[in-house]
Amino acid sequence: MAENIPGTDTPASSPSKVPDKPVLEGLEESLTKRWLEEGTYKFDRETTRDQVYSIDTPPPTASGSLHVGHMFSYTQTDVLARFQRMNGKNVFYPMGWDDNGLPTERRVQNYYGVRCDPKISYDAGYHPPAAPAKNQRDFDVISRKNFIQLCEELAVEDEKVFENLFQTLGLSVDWALSYRTIDDHSRAVSQRGFLENLTAGDAYMAEAPTLWDVTFRTAVAQAELEDREMPGAYYRFPFFAEDGTKIFIETTRPELLAACSALVANPDDERYKALFGKKVTSPLFGVQVEVHPHALAKADKGSGIAMVCTFGDLTDVIWWRELQLPTRAIIGRDGRILSDTPEWITTEEGRENYASIAGKTVFSAKEAVMTMLTDTELLDGEPKKIMHPVNFFEKGDKPLEIVSSRQWYIRNGGRDADRREHLINRGKEIEFHPAYMRSRYENWISGLNGDWLVSRQRFFGVPVPVWYPLDADANPDYDHPIMPTSEMLPVDPAADAAPGYTEEQRNAAGGFVGDADVLDTWATSSMTPQIVGGWGVDEELFNNVYPFDLRPQGHDIIRTWLFSSAVRADALQGSAPWKHAAISGWILDPDRKKMSKSKGNVVVPTDVLNDFGTDAVRYWAASAKLGADTAYEIAQMKIGRRLAIKLLNASKFVLNLGATEANVLTEATEAATNPAATLPNAGNAPALGPATNPLDRAVLAQLADVVRQSTAAFEKYDYAKALQTTESFFWHFTDDYVELIKDRAYGAAGEAEKASVLAALATTLDSLLRLFAPFLPFATEEVWGWWREGSVHRAKWPTAVDVEDGDTTMLATVGDALSGLRKAKSEAKVKQRTQVLSATIVAEEAKAVQLSAGLGDLKAAANALEVTVVMGQGELEVIDVVLAPAEEAAQV
């Protein structure tokens, strides 16, 4: 059961609480403090699953700074959370910090001026330089343990800043549910998941071609790839057939010539059919390779025949695997050509030529090969310059290489058509918002070309939780990993001895060696439902929140976070991890480019929060639909600020008229006195009387429609429509209704009419505060406190109850008439208080009836003596307006 904050529905507070000059400034600090102290958003553990609405909140990367894109997407999630809470749900709304992995390492390296070398001993008294060196070559080189300690310290400090900002943004998170992806709990859950995958055969180790970032010296998964258009060139040179015929190939990577293991051409290419199955010899290195047919070879690309090197690109990997070619790797993990001459190069000339490139960078090796080809007159013509897509690690600065290495993988369907189809069907259990985002999930699965590589050659991360026994020659037995028991988790095999061994046996013959790698950060983030839900630790909690109701996230990480989470949940729980996925769009700069720290086009959140206030920023964020890329618009924030200020001032006016909580019409009271006019329930306070005036009943009927439409929109996760619907009604309420009823509200038409209008005012204000609460939490909470106890955010979502004889369009009609009379005064250049001696309003029959019913309020608001309503055709028209002379107007 959701926690009930005492006092939410207690009798009205004193009107003296209404300030003389309401302001937005300072509300964030004072109300945030109050919400934290009172536990306004606290999750109640005494619950059942049907009462809970659980959110798998994205843990932002804690290495760096937030930008307006974070405010945008996290506000959208919070709006949904607030609606569910007011709708009676016990909302499980945690916040995590993604602080392990490469981003944190990079930040620590640059912030402190340090580099990690695992071979260096731990220094218990180490302190980083006071002034970090600018050149990485001059950084302090420190031990793995010292480096990890610095990562921990800086991440914690960054997270304090993030938490403060998110609280200022008004996120209704239960901060007692915070977690970090590198703390003991997260590491234990992540390692347990990996071990269960391993035991079930869903995780495995393999020596295979691996995408490799030479700068960070780590493997990279397919989901982390980024294609970038780069300048390059085609270089044309020959291989030699047995009869001496030159077979010209064109390649962008001549530096890999020594790694060539075959040539391939399209099976239908008549130029090369005679060569299939025969051997040709490579230039410079004198290595014989076979010519193969393969459908991926393009007859119209270059010379139509391609050099297969292991490995130049991902297509080489496909050819290598499907044609069962030999592995001839020449690029090391440092991005340089291997120093030792490969055994497949046997000629003296070939070995000499290889020695001229050994140890060089890829760039220098290319220059050396080109020089040799030119000197031997083998280069045919000038290189053809091109622009072509090149694979990069999304966080990297240099093109990726493909090296052969031993890595850990999790099965994700990349090599299993049945598993791919199974995961696509699993995704159909999730309702995507917007629905078309499902295709991105399914398209990604369909395009996979390998399993998920989850091991990383980094330091600050969740260690791969296995050791390997060493034989008599101290060689590791990778086929029989030693696994920890669940009670041992979390473990660090680089620091903890394997079960059954002592530390003295580490790296010794007959002893053990710990796996030195860490898990990909997505391998831990993919388990956020299990981490925050207490899987394996608090099964009662886990059963009450899992599967989660909502996963909110950006569309750019459907291929990573969303898909990887679905893979893990399918394998570990046999289910989808959530019922709904709310996909937010990007924030675009004025040039319609995505805002990102790497592009340097971000806006700092504190600036806009200080300039416009939280409610204004939230209004801008909530105005955008899920999935929509949205421009950063200050103009929209200004509108939001104006709305929040208007809400304060209109509420002040209504309450100062005498509307109080006691005026709010309740279902019980109205059902007894006027069954046709039962209205939104606002508590148990007695009503002063039913809303009897047609205009009052009209505004309440319109309010019921607004509540109904807003509720339906929220239930479809279309919060933007709910905001638009509520805001549109609010401006009609303030600009038309409040202006029309002032005379009656002050008692000019008697106590019965005053009671009617006060009931309508109080009831409408009550519902508007609730309707706006998810979007403008600070302004609505401020007003709520002027006449209520407790928090609006623990109040019930309003219920739409029809007013049977209420006319939902009457207010607009009477408002249009009032605007027409005011326009006549403006055109006559007289003050609005000038009396209208007479006027005629022509309107079609239905509107004429509405005007007649609201004529008293219209005349009072327009200061009119006589207004005649005439039935006609077409649009409503105000004619024959006679105004009092200027001197009489002045006396009035």
Image (cartoon, rainbow, N blue to C red):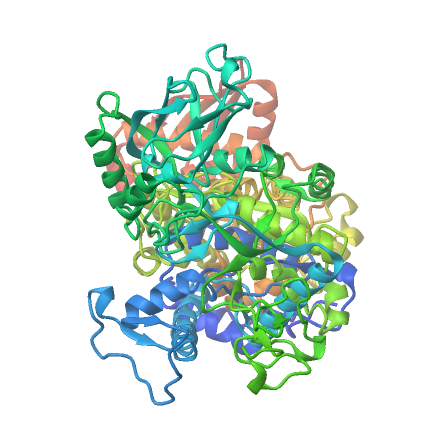
Q: Nearer the viewer, residue 88 or 476?
A: 476
Q: Nearer the viewer, residue 448 or 33?
A: 448
Q: Nearer the viewer, residue 604 or 141?
A: 141
Residue 329: x and y in percent read 44, 46
Residue for point 57% across, 62% down: 524
Image quarter where the C terminus lies is top left
Tally of marks: 0
Regarding residue 775, the answer to whether it shows in the image is: no
> Which quadrant of the figure has residue 218?
bottom left
Q: In the rendered view, tell whether residue 6 sits above or below residue 734.
A: below
Residue 276: x and y in percent read 53, 20
Q: Is residue 606 left or right of residue 270?
A: left
> Which quadrant of the figure has residue 22?
bottom left
Regarding residue 591, the answer to whether it shows in the image is: yes
Residue 728: x and y in percent read 50, 39
Image quarter where the N terminus lies is bottom right
Residue for point 20% across, 70% down: 133
Q: In the rendered view, tell whether residue 284 sits above or below residue 739.
A: above
Residue 399: x and y in percent read 35, 44
* Residue placed furthest toward the bottom: 125
* Residue placed furthest toward the top: 270
Q: In the rendered view, tell whether residue 244 sits above or below residue 431.
A: above
Q: Nearer the viewer, residue 849 or 6?
A: 6
Residue for point 39% across, 80% down: 146
Q: Is residue 589 left or right of residue 440?
A: left
